[in-house]
Image (cartoon, rainbow, N blue to C red):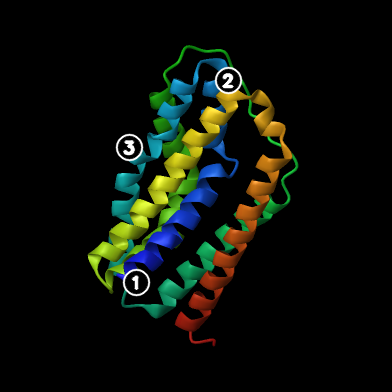
């Protein structure tokens, strides 16, 4: 039970950080909310549920095939740490958020699905970060892996929906210090995970 809670918390932290960090999908959430309505912003927010299933499946399949090689897993872990570190740096150094707005007819869910499929972030995350965590969690039980996935998506989608609601209520939210401070705080969280992945990668490579 404690192991499942451990992975659930990991999922929550990473999901929240991913959910509020600036990126193509969040920009679309904001623009659809501002141009059309909060409903359209919410529809974009749930796009990862539709797009990520095949990405997760393929990533887990690929990594399970090389799970016997500590060297390859170590390299993947170090790659994941560099991805996390780049996201952490971007979040910590952020100054403002300016989504591009275009007045077009709402097809928000469709646009959200296309945007997420074409973004490199889901592929990089699940191949180098998410799937290694899932495989590690499976060693303690499938419920631990499901707990991580549940925690991740509850906060990934929930935080984007919350932003859509806040933007709909007050367009000044995007320029508020509170939002910038929260983004910077998630940068610190991502930096901590980057360090953990570096340590894990070095252990697998036999360097520490």
In this view, the mark in front (2 or 3): 2
**Residue 34, position as x, y percentages in the image:** 58, 20
Residue under the point 49% across and 41% down: 159
Which quadrant does the C terminus fall into?
Answer: bottom right
**Location of residue 194 in the rendering, given as x and y in whole percent from the top left corner:** 57, 66
- Does 122 appear above or below 76? above
3D distance between C-alphas at marks 1 and 3: 30 Å
The image position of residue 203, as x and y in percent, is 49, 83
Q: Secondary structure at mark 2?
A: helix
- How far apart marks 2 and 3 lie (CA) works out to 23 Å
Element class at badge 1 = helix
Whole-Å distance between the Cαs marked 2 and 1? 42 Å
The residue lying at 56 percent from left, 58 percent from top is 83
> What crowding class fits label 1: few (fewer than 14 Cα within 10 Å), some (14-19), or many (20 or more)?
few
Decide: marks 1, 3 in contact (CB < 8 A)?
no
Disc 3, SS = helix
Q: Residue furthest left?
A: 142
Instruction: Give the labeled residue for mark 2.
Output: 34
N-terminal-most mark, 2 or 1:
1
Label drawn at residue 155: none
Residue under label 1: 2
In the displayed structure, would residue 41 be above or below residue 180?
above
Look at the image and tell me in which quarter the N terminus lies.
bottom left
Looking at the rendered image, the disc whose residue lies closer to the viewer, 2 or 1, is 1
Rendered view: 6 above or below 43: below
- Mark earlier in primary sequence (2, 3): 2
Q: x, y percentage for residue 27?
A: 57, 32
Q: Which residue is mark 3?
A: 50
Q: Residues within 10 Å of mark 3 (few under 14, many from 20)?
A: few
Tell me if residue 142 comes above or below residue 173 in the rendering.
below
Inspect this view and state whether residue 59 appears.
yes
Q: Residue at x 52, y 64 (%)?
A: 79
């Amino acid at each position: 039970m404690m192991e499942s809670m451990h992975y659930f918390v990991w999922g929550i932290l990473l999901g929240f950080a991913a959910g509020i960090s600036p990126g193509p999908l969040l920009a679309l959430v904001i623009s659809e909310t501002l141009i059309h309505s909060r409903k359209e912003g919410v529809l974009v927010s749930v796009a990862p549920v539709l797009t990520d299933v095949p990405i997760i499946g393929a990533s887990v399949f690929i990594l399970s095939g090389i799970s016997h090689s500590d060297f390859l897993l170590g390299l993947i872990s170090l790659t994941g740490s560099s991805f996390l570190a780049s996201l952490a740096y971007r979040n910590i150094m952020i100054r403002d958020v300016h989504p591009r707005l275009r007045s077009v007819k709402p097809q928000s869910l469709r646009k959200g699905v296309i945007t997420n499929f074409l973004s490199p972030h889901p592929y990089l995350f699940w191949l180098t970060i998410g799937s290694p965590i899932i495989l590690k969690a499976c060693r303690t039980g499938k419920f631990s892996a499901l707990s991580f996935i549940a925690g991740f998506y509850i906060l990934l989608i929930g935080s984007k929906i919350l932003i859509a609601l806040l933007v709909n209520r007050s367009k000044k939210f995007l320029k508020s210090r509170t939002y910038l401070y929260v983004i910077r705080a998630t940068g610190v969280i991502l930096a901590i995970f980057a360090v953990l992945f570096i340590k894990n990668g070095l252990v697998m490579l036999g360097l520490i």
